[in-house]
Image (cartoon, helix red, strand yellow):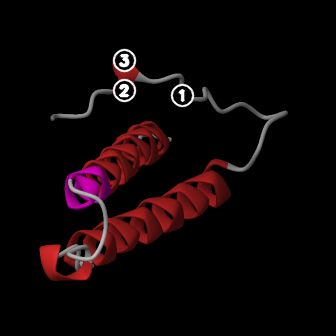
Amino acid sequence: MTVTTADYTTPITNLNGSDPKVLLKEWELARASLETARENLHMATCHGRDFQCQEPGTLYKALDEKSEALQALDAAIDLATAWVLVLMKD
């Protein structure tokens, strides 16, 4: 998905608000941390051999839960990216 700033509520910086440079650093750090978390979760093992002694379907439930967590991280990365794009213009 291509992130556009129109998809998210992003700030319009002003003299009474936060320093745009500080905000940019914070959101860049957040985005980098989320990307690292996504990479690590993606690489984390979720293999059938670890569920063979459980109820049928347990592996598929675990895979679905992992997929949902990855999707949530993708959404958070998109949000952080939108903020970075806006703040880079300041």
Q: Amino acid at mark 2?
A: Thr
Tell me the distance, in whole angstroms, between the alpha carbons under discs 1 and 2: 7 Å
Label annotation for residue 6: 3
Asked if labels 2 and 1 touch by Cβ distance under 8 angstroms, the answer is yes
In the shown orientation, is residue 12 left or right of residue 62? right
Tell me what residue is drawn at x 31 percent, y 77 percent. Answer: 40
Q: Which residue is mark 2?
A: 5
Dot 3: few (<14), some (14–19), or many (≥20) neighbours within 10 Å?
few
Tell me what residue is drawn at x 42 percent, y 63 percent. Answer: 34
Q: What is the quadrant of residue 75 in the picture?
A: top left
Q: Which residue is mark 1?
A: 10
Tell me the distance, in whole angstroms, between the alpha carbons under discs 3 and 1: 8 Å
Start-end of magenta stretch: 57-63
Tell me the SS state at disc 1: loop
Task: Reply yes or no: does residue 59 show up in magenta.
Answer: yes
Asked if labels 3 and 2 touch by Cβ distance under 8 angstroms, the answer is yes
Q: Amino acid at mark 1?
A: Thr
Tell me the SS state at disc 2: helix
Task: Reply yes or no: does residue 47 show up in magenta.
Answer: no
Q: Amino acid at mark 3?
A: Ala
